[in-house]
Image (cartoon, rainbow, N blue to C red):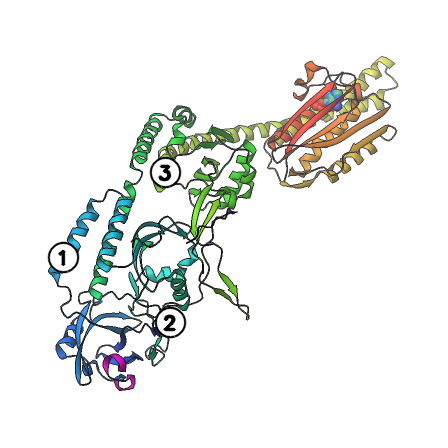
Amino acid sequence: MDRKEKIIITQRVNSNIDYNEQIHIPNFIQDHGVLLVLQEPDLDIIQVSSNTEEWLNIPPENLLEQNIECLLYSHQIDNIRQNLAGDFEYINPLQLSIKCGNEVRLFNSIIHRNDGVVILELEACEDESGLDFSQFYQLTFPIINKIQKSGNLHELCEIVVKEIRKITEFDRVMIYKFHPDDSGEVIAEDKREDQEAYLGLHYPAYDVPQVARAVFSVKFIRTIPNINSSIVELVPKFNPLTNQLLDLTFSVLRGVSPCHIEYLDNMGVMGSMSISLVKEEKLWGLIACHHQSVKYIPYDKQVICEFLGKIMSIHIPMREQNDNLDYKVSLKSVQSEVIKIISESDDLLNVITNIGSKLLTIVGATGSVISLEGEYHKIGITPSDAEITELINWLKNQMNTDIYSTDSLPIIYPSAKKFKESVGGLLVLEIAKLQEVYVLWFRPEVSQTVNWAGNPEYPIEIESDGKMKLCPRKSFEQWQEIVKFHSLPWQSYEIQGAQEFKSAIVGIVMRRISELAKINLELEKSNNELDSFTYIASHDLKEPLRGIHNYSTFLIEDYGEILNEDGRAKLDTLVRLTQRMEDLINALLFFSRLGRQELHKSSIDLNKLIENVAEVVRMSKPGSSIEIRKMENLPGIYGDKILMEEVFSNLINNAVKYNKKEDKIVKIGYEETEESASIIYVKDNGIGIREKHLETIFKIFKRLHGKDKFGGGTGVGLTIVKKIIERHGGQIWLESKYGEGTTFYVKLWNQ
Ligand code: ADP
């Protein structure tokens, strides 16, 4: 095999090409045996393979509708009948002497039930003796002993490939392990010295299509002695009981898909055998055996191989646990330390400070973020706050269980490619969705080199009728692929560490949440009280105020002439003061409601919003020279439209109001930020604000001028603006030069 190198940057090949071929109902068998379909309970022959004459000296038509008595002796039939109640697991494999016309021939046979019928398969028996129990025991016992002594997965696989090769004498025996993405890797190999090594090669997922995997997970052994076997059809074509093609899932002679034959041929393989390796009821891998020439494996040896496959399957979980033992032990010890720290504290913030970088060690991460009460507590290397916010928003729709992990975040979440820190893998715990309590762990991207057996691109051909056909790969030359955007995978014991962490902190978090709920309840109560207070203020106080105002007005109207000028001036002041008091009460009312009212957020076109506000400002000051210059294409923002109008109306009004220039110029523009937020500014050429007042102007009722100067005012406008911005998660600040002008900056999130 020439070594070819190609560096491609790609994501791993996806698995699920649907193999249209129904490999379990090929309707033909391989030619090294005979298949008989029997109907229970009498065991009448209802369907046979078309090669019966060759093997049994009887043509198919003479067998159909006959009873099995025509082939077997009564003690053999009795033996089969006794097992009809079960699944024949106690009698396979059988050695049967069969009446073949004038002679009796010896066959190895396997019997099973499927598709509502009994299927009897016969293969010529070369050796009359077969394996008895003591031979079986002698052969398997030392192997099982070795398997039991194996320390880890690597040792286990090495033993199995060597022993299976010794028993079967295949040219090559490999252990082929499936990865989570369904691609496979050769993790152990024993082979003829002159053959090239496949050890370490990866095979794309479609090399073992889903349908084949389904069959492998129920039928544990598969032999193909000769890929050049002729096709032996069944007679009649359909199973007479179901009128469907006979289901050959469990048949040992099942015909081989032409595509698979081509695949083996391209690999230089003529005979093969595969044994399924199953872990926790899922297909974990295969023991794959290849031979360059025709290779028959007698049933008794097949049984031994299948048996060893099962023994190996039982040992896989334990041996996997022993892999990376040192790392696992150190991980466990840090995990216990962390659990101890958690059990000794009752405040999550304390926990975070006390465990420090151990939070990273428990799952083998390089960065972690705990999102708690709107704040991100970061340890190690993490993305920025804005990136985390976006990521959490994405995760909310992504997570349907309380734990989520990926070793290829940038592929499923492309924004991660732009993170300022490299992130390949993410592990997330959702502690409380509603309260947005999450723990995130990050792992950096690690470029991995994968050696593929051949080019791992899809071998799909589009046929002339438009149908997609999967074609076997022709080339098995080594291809190197550099896989980007991946981290090292999260191991099950690391994920388990995360889960244990969750169980330990969940109590503390829940306690905190219920405390917060209590505080919220109290807050709501006092808000309600404040609400009634503001209602009283607005309603009850306004009533006598209205009275004072009305009576003062009546006094001016009815007795104005009797009073002297000083008296009339005092009454005018009284009217003005009542008006001002009403304005203050109204402003207070608006402000108190603002803190509690629900925000109705939507995408807002700032261009339109500012144009509308500017129009109103211009119209309210008809005689003045006002120029409001808006930058084109202001960004879209996300917020409550009515409240945003309030913000910009206040800022633009102030820019015009606190301005003594003949030509009042207001400029509105924006600056992009690194996060998905924009900074909008409102700049005027007005009177400016002294440095010492820059903070205080946001305080309620704070005015920098006499109450009637610059057209009067309540001193509540900027307080309201700040409150609205903060409720939108934004910020407001200003720069000013006394006598020259002021610029207000507002940072708001884009849609
Ligand atoms: P009001 O305008 O009702 O007084 P605001 O809360 O809007 O209340 O503003 C508070 C104070 O801040 C104003 O009284 C004014 O002294 C000062 N101020 C606000 N905007 C500007 C501005 N653009 N230029 C100069 N001073 C300003």
User: With 61 as the anchor, is 551 left or right in this view?
Assistant: right
Task: Give the mark, 2 or 3, whose residue is nearer the N terminus.
Answer: 2
> Relative to 17, is 72 above or below?
below
Q: Which residue is mark 2?
A: 26
> Relative to 56, is 689 above or below?
above
Of circles 1 and 2, the one toward us is: 1
Q: Residues within 10 Å of mark 3 (few under 14, many from 20)?
A: many
Q: Residues within 10 Å of mark 1 (few under 14, many from 20)?
A: few
Give the amino acid type for the residue marked by disc 1 in the picture: Tyr
Which is the main secondary structure of the residues drawn in magenta? helix
Q: Position of residue 127 (x, y in %)?
A: 17, 69
Q: Which residue is mark 3?
A: 494
Q: Which residue is mark 1?
A: 137
Q: Find residue 583 and report its image quarter.
A: top right
Residue depicted at x 33% and y 32%: 335
Secondary structure under the numbered disc 3 in the rendered image: helix
Give the amino acid type for the residue marked by disc 2 in the picture: Pro
Q: Find residue 465 and report its image quarter.
A: bottom right
Q: Which residues are magenta?
A: 53-62
